[in-house]
Every structure is written in structure tokens, then in C-alpha cells.
Amino acid sequence: MLVLCVAAVTGVVVTTATPAMCPPVCFCPLDGRGRRQVVCTQGGLEDPLPVLDMPSDAEVLIVTAPRSRPNKLTLGPIFKGHQRLEEVEVTWSGVPALGAHSFWGLRRLRYLNVSHNALTAVIDTDFRGADALVKLDLSHNELQSVPSAVFRHVPKLAFLSLAHNRLPELNPRVFYGLTNLHTLHLTHNPLGLLLHNLFSDTPKLKELRCAACGLQAVSGKLLDALSELQVLDLRENRLTEMPPVSGARQLTALHLDGNHIGKLMRGSVSGPPLATLTLANNRLASLQSHALVNSSLAHLDLGYNRLRRIRLDAVSDGFSKLRWLRLSGNPLQVENLVQVVPRSRQLRHLELGDLHLARLPAELLRHSRHLKTLNVSGNMLSSFPAAALYATPHLMTLDLSHNNFRGLEEDLVAAFTSMASLERVWLHGNPWQCRRCHVAPMLEWLARPSAAGHPHAQAMCRTLPDSPRCLRCMGPHQLAGHELQLLKVEQLPECTGEADWAGWLGYGDGERIRGIREGETIDEGDSSPVLGVLGEHLGLVAGVGCGIVLALLLVVAAALLLARRHSALYYTHEPAHHDSAQKLMGRNNNDNSPPGPRAPTPRTPRHTPVIATIEETDSIAGSSVDLQAGRELRAPRIVRLAASPLP
């Protein structure tokens, strides 16, 4: 109204700009660079794409959909009236094909993203007319073949992604014309092999990613052909040896996680100026002498392998400039770590999780004054040396989760309080014993205003019970399951000797143990005692079990030995008649006389049982050894474990 009055007085004509058109299913804001956008994200769109309702000055088009409500669209030469478009994104729309000349005339188009669609093939006319295209994303489609020279109409292309398709091979000269290509993504295609002559048309390629491509080997000629390559990603393949990288003189990052590499040979990474080397989740069992001689390494990941020991001569100068080191998940001994870790005096990030460490010596971090992140989660630590914190004055994050802490010592809490740089201490997953001697210093620390930024400063269990910020008491019994942050120091029971060993076993406290002794039944749902023993002290339980099994084996062996000694004795009785003895002996009586009538043998009087030896047993069973003179052969009534059975 004021404007109209002023216009009436001054006689100036005032015009109001009408807003540009926008499809009713979209919205048309300006981006950070002031460009007009058309954004359609609600999903459920079907042909035709509402380009007729788009403002003619639109420079960015984004069409996508939630997974629960995908679009069903097709493309074609529908953008002729929108030649100012610089970016086009049509994703999650079920597009089956790009269509010939779909982008004809879009000479300002620099970015085209048609990922997460249903493309099965591309042809060279799909990109004709988009001469200025720099970035093309064809990932997450169903491409099974890419013809040779299909990208020759986009010579300025610098980024190309064919990742997550179904390409079994790459046709010769498939990258013809891409002399400016810098980045190529082939990840998650069943290629099986990368031939060096495929990249003869990409002399400026700096980044090649072919993770999960089924590769079993990499030829040295491949890296020789890629003379300007800086980043090589070959994760999750089937490589058993390190690729020969000596020819890649500009290679700075090599990612080999998730392969089958068993060892690093001498000089495996010598040659290129490697700054990043990741070998996690392989089968590394040894590092040979001078395996990591490259002194330019700043980021090294050896996590979750089979390394029992790291030789000092293997990392002679390879650790001197390290800033990021992960050794988690290896069966390394703490004595070896004390020798290796201090060699990295420039460390900012150190991960020693899942090493089954029962202690952490303070001298391990004696040269880590620049350290900012320390992860020792997943071990069996029940204490942490405060001196180690004072040796790392710039530490910002400390992860003590999933260990065996029952509480925190006063000197450690005092170190937390005095370190102004410490921002986060992760403590979840520990068997907290909520008694004064264990958690009172920790509760007082978390209640201070200076600890307000720590992850466990506020109670989170009620709203987010699965959150890592949630801390719960394992004992004593009356506080088991309670949220630790909600407790007051006055509510905590005092420590007792019986409660200490009861808590160590994973039970609630001494009162709980006494209740069990007196016949108290344990609820079926209350598995904390069992979980405490099996979860927190699995090594002790396994050791006791092995001891019991070994003792049983020794008892069985002794019983067998005793039985064998007794088997040398058997009891015999003289037969009533000679005929019965003769029938028992049969043809094994060692009588060489010719056949015919035999003289009767006079009966012998019955004797008391006689003990025979093993030698005599052998004679009875058919041996050629003669019985001693004057001894009568008597048929055995009971024979135990005879040397040779009777026929």
C-alpha cells in the first residue's frame, strides 16, 4: 500500500516480476551459485517428464525418488527448449535407455547423472551433441556391454563411472577419444582381468578404481602404461601378491583391502611416492626385511591380518613419517608393540583395537606427543595408565569401549580432567560395577560442567537404549541394568572383598552370590552370571576346560597301561580228562608223529590253578616253543588278552 501511494505521488510506474514457471510436482529454488533449479523428489512420476512446465532459464534439473516410490520415466530429445541446462540428474527412475540425441544441443551441459536406473546398453549417439560434458555417471545400472569408441563425442570427459554394472569384459578401444579422462570407476563389475592396452587412449588417467572386479593378478605392464596414475583401488579382489608398483612413479595411494595377500616381500612398495597404503583384511602373516622401506608413507592400514610379530627391519624407515596407523585385529604381543609404535613420532591417529591386550604399558606412547586419536577398544583392559595420557597432551578422542573396565581409577579421572584437549572418551560395552570404589570418581567427573561435551555426560539409555552413549551397571545385583549416569554417589554401595571377586566373575555382587549359596533360584531371563563368565573371561574358562580334558586323557592312558600289565596274567585249571585237553589244542599240539592209534595217556591228578606266562601262552596258542619238562599242559578256562588267539 505504501508503495502504491508513493507511486501515485511521484508518478512512477511500479511493476512486479511474476515468478517463473515450476512443475506442480517439483520446486524451483536457487542453488548456492544463484542458478535456477528444478527439483522433483517426491517420486511416483510417470511419462512424460514435466519439462514443458519447467522455466526456460533452468540450469539444474534433479529428478529422483525414494526407493519405496520409484519413478517410471523414459528419456529422449525432450530438452531442446532448455539449452541453458548445466546439470541433469535423473536417478531412481527406471530409465531403460538414454535414447539417441537425447542431449543434442545442450552445449552447456557439464554433468550428467543417470545412475540407479535400468540401463542395459549405451550407444555412441546417446551422447552426441553434449560436447561440453565433463562428468558422466552411469553407475548402478544393468549394463552388460559398452561398445568401442562409445564416448568419442564427449572428448572433454574427465570423470566416468561404470561401477556396479554387469560388465564381463571391456571391449578394445572402449575409451577411445577420452584423452582428458582423469577418473575411472569400474568397481563391482565381473571383469576378471585388466589388460594394459585398454588404457592406451587415457594417457592422463590419475585415478583408477576396480574394487570387487574378480581380479586374480595385475600385470606390471598395466601400471607402466598408466604413467600418471596417482590412486589405485583394487580392494575386495582375489590378489595373492602385491601388484608390481615400481613402474607407477606418481602413485600416492594404493588400496588393497580384502584380498588374499599372504606376505610383503622385500621392497614391495619401493619406487612410487606412496603416502597411503591399506592392506586390511588380507592374510598377511609376515613382513620381510625392508618390506616397507618407503619413507613417504603417511597412512598405513595393516588391520585384521595374521601378523604375530612386526620385524623392526621391515619398517626401518617406513614408519618415520606415519600419521595414521592401524594394527587392530592382529595377534600381536604387547612387547612387540612397545618396540614398533614409538618409531612413529608423527602419529596423529593410532588404532590398537581387538588385539586381546590385557595391559597397556605407558612406554608404548612415549613418543606420541602429537597423537589426537587413540583406539584401544575390544581388548581385555581393566585399567589404563594415566602416564600414557600425560605423554599425549594433544589427545582429543580416546576409545576404551568393549574392554573389561569395572570402574575408573582416580588418577585416570584426574588426567581426564586436566587435559583441556580431550573431547571424547568412549566407555560403553564395559562390565561396570556400580560401587563407590569403582565408579564414584567417574560419576563425579561426568557431573562437572567441563565434561558436558563428552559422549557419556548425559543419560541416553531411555531414549536410545542401543546407543553407544548408554552406560549400564552390570553389578551389584540391586543396581544391575540401571543407567550409570542417573545414579548418585550416595546410592552406590560400598565395596566388599566378596563383592570384588563376585564382580570379577561377572556376577552382580557378593550378596547375589550368597543368595545363590543359600538356594536362591536364578530367573531364566537373568543370564548375567553366565555371560559374565563366558563373555569377559573366556580365556580363563577355556584354559580350565582344556586342563580338565587333559587330566581325563591322562587317567584313560594310565588305565590302559595298567590293563596291559595285568593282561600278562591269566588263570588256568587242569581239565578232568586228557581228551578235553587234546580237543582244545587241536592241530596246534606240535606232535609230528605219523597218524594212527595213539597210546592212552594216564590221567594226572587234579591240581590247583597255575599261572602261565605270555611265553607259555604263545606255546599253548600254537608256538613251537616246548613246554618245560615235567609240566603238564592244562586247558585254560579263562584267557585275557592272549598274545595270539586260539584257532
Image (cartoon, helix red, strand yellow):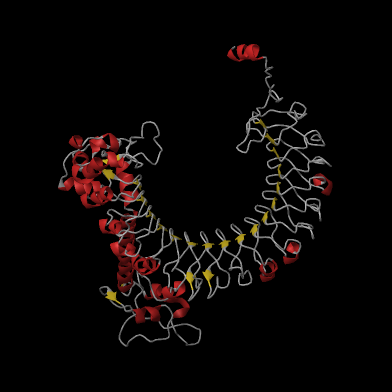
Task: Answer left or right for 578 relative to 418.
Answer: right
| Whether residue 586 is situated above or below residue 362 in the rendered picture | below
Nearer to me, 613 or 51: 51
| Whether residue 206 is situated above or below residue 55 in the rendered picture | below
Query: Could you tell me if residue 382 is visible in this image?
Result: yes
x, y percent for residue 169? 74, 57
Query: Residue at (47%, 82%) from the top-left corner?
Result: 597
Q: Quadrant of the N terminus?
A: top right
Task: Answer left or right for 535 relative to 306.
Answer: left
What residue occupies the far front of the structure in this picture? Answer: 10
x, y percent for residue 245? 61, 69
| Whether residue 427 is situated above or below residue 52 in the rendered picture | below
x, y percent for residue 104? 82, 41
x, y percent for residue 238? 61, 61
Nearer to me, 383 or 594: 383
Which quadrant would residue 337 be assigned to in this image? bottom left
Task: Answer left or right for 189 relative to 637.
Answer: right
Which quadrant would residue 569 be assigned to in this image? bottom left
For the image shown, how many numbered marks are present on the structure? 0
Nearer to me, 466 or 247: 247
Query: Residue at (81%, 53%) from the top-left corner?
Result: 152
Query: Residue at (66%, 65%) from the top-left corner?
Result: 228
| Whether residue 84 is situated above or below residue 210 in the rendered picture | above
Query: Could you tell me if residue 573 is visible in this image?
Result: no
Which quadrant would residue 360 be assigned to in this image? bottom left
